[in-house]
Image (cartoon, grey):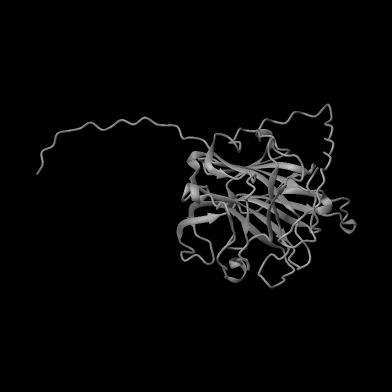
Amino acid sequence: MLHRMSLAIVCCHVGLGFAIAAAAPADTAASTAKPAAPKKPVLVPGTGSLVKGVVDDFEDEKWKWYYNHPKSSEEQDKRMRGPLGKSANGRWFEGPKRGTPDVVKRIELPAPGLEGSSHGLLMASLHAGIPGRVTYQMQQDDLIYNMQKVTGRGMSVADSPSVVVRVYMPPFEQWERRSGPTFGFRAGCYTHAIITGDDHPDEGKFGLEEYWPGMFICFEPQNPKRKIEKDSAYIRVRSGRNGGEIRGPQIEELGWWTLGLSFTPDGMVHYFASPGVDDLTMDDHITSQFPYGYRTELLKTFFFNVCTRDDGRTWSTPWVIDDPKVYFVKRPQTATTAPARTNRSRR
């Protein structure tokens, strides 16, 4: 029996009603259509070996989230309200820039997913933005994986790192009735460039620049006035070389999806998405980019955004993730020749 709940909730007892959406029929291609040109192979997320200790399957019955409200809102009002929220296992923490989702809770999976998996992580928000205020604008909360606990400063792209996660897309009746981004899967990255952060002490100088490429799931609710005949959703990529966002594939099926990001030694970021929980393949490749014109040097971590209209009344779409993992490809060993020794007299 599927786990069922209602979003008229308080943080100590959360629930959401779920249903498994039927797959949309695939379009029938005309018999005269030319076959698509094969894509140039890139690093498929999930290639290589698992990074030991950078994983969470949410199966531990003792999994718990400590909220530590009021949440941080450094991006909006320069106030980082510590101590930050965190998970009992030390693997997740509240985003200091925008704060924790209002609901972070281990739950039974809303529909069968990965083989052997029975639990995932629910995220949802009502009061995003500055605590105690209502902005009536889209705000977002962040849940960040504590990858630096294992990898330190970060993973070099020379190791071809990648991140894979399963995300449950609920029936459209459960989505917040707002056009625009509702969920984000992103990475924290570093490169050397002119520093652009407004609050960075070295703004305008050449140094270590942090940026956050990734993918957003965007909703377009039915709206007869705008001639939108039915609810729909699509993936939006952040970002292209000039910083502009790229519209990705339409989400034709609901239920579980597999999302992936990979990072190659040339500094490119590769974006993948596929319905279902199967491993990703080149058929799931969306695009490859140098976001903002940067060449990625280090993968610092990955994180998730939950977005809402911040009106004090409307809950975000309920999002469930499962089994995030990070992979790497061992660098090839290169032979080196030691320099010949010469006898030199000391002077």
187 above or below 164?
below
Q: Quadrant of the N terminus?
A: top right
Q: Is residue 268 above or below residue 97?
A: above
Residue at the image point whose x is 67% and y is 59% from the top: 101
In the displayed structure image, the side of residue 23 where residue 87 appears, left or right: left
Instruction: Give the residue drawn at x 72%, y 63%.
Output: 138
Query: Percent position (x, y) of residue 237?
Result: 67, 49
User: Total number of numbered labels?
Assistant: 0
Outermost residue, top direction? Answer: 31
Would residue 239 be visible to someone looking at this image?
Answer: no
* Depth check, front residue: 57 or 228: 57
Front residue of 280 and 34: 280
From this view, report whether residue 289 is shown above or below residue 278: below
Judge left or right: residue 32 versus residue 44. Answer: right
Where residue 184 sits in the image (x, y, percent)?
A: 67, 52
Q: Seen from this angle, which residue lies furthest bottom?
A: 132
Image check: 21 left or right of 264? right
Viewer-nearest residue: 58 or 295: 58
How far across and how far down the image is residue 45, in percent?
A: 60, 38
Residue name at image x 69 percent, y 61 percent: 102
User: Quarter-wise, where is residue 56 in the image?
Assistant: top right
Q: Is residue 336 visible?
A: yes
Q: Nearer the viewer, residue 308 or 157?
A: 308
Q: Is residue 299 left or right of residue 182?
A: left
| Residue at position x 74%, y 42% in the image | 256
The part of the image, by quadrant, that contains residue 27 is top right
On the rendered image, what quadrant is the C terminus found in? top left
